Amino acid sequence: MLKNLIGIHEASRKSGFSEIYLRKLCQGGKIKARKFGVTWVIDPASLEQYVKSERKRGRPPLTNSI
């Protein structure tokens, strides 16, 4: 899982979710991520899958979507 990981800031920019919300998703295991010290790195495929599932639930499309 250590290939092609992205940081919280980049994930926030791509997904439109706040960094705080993304950290909660990481902590809750909603998206695949690893924590190195205080820094979370996210699997972009997992993030994309989560964004798509939220859209199916009726959330509006994000402006900076993946």
Image (cartoon, rainbow, N blue to C red):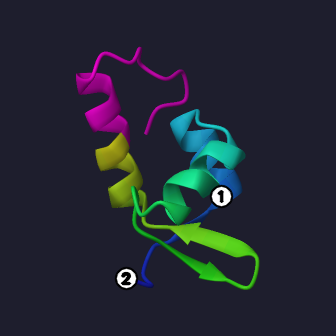
Q: Is 42 positioned to the left or the right of 49 in the image?
A: right
For the view shown, which residue lies furthest in the front direction? Answer: 28
Q: Position of residue 42 (x, y in %)?
A: 51, 65
Q: Residue at x 39, y 56 (%)?
A: 30
Q: What residue did someone put label 1 on?
A: 8
Nearer to me, 54 or 44? 54
Q: Residue at x 31, y 25 (%)?
A: 55
- Count all numbered tags in the image, as a single digit: 2
The vertical placement of 11 against 14, above or below, is below
**Predominant secondary structure, magenta span:** loop
Q: What residue did someone put label 2 on?
A: 1
Q: Residue at x 43, y 66 (%)?
A: 43
Q: Position of residue 50 (x, y in %)?
A: 34, 45
Is residue 54 covered in magenta? yes
- How far is the residue under mark 2 from the one under mark 1? 16 Å
Tell me, for residue 19, which label it has, or none. Answer: none
Nearer to me, 58 or 44? 58
Q: Is 62 positioned to the left or the right of 20 in the image?
A: left
- Range covered by the magenta-colored residues: 51-66
Nearer to me, 62 or 31? 31
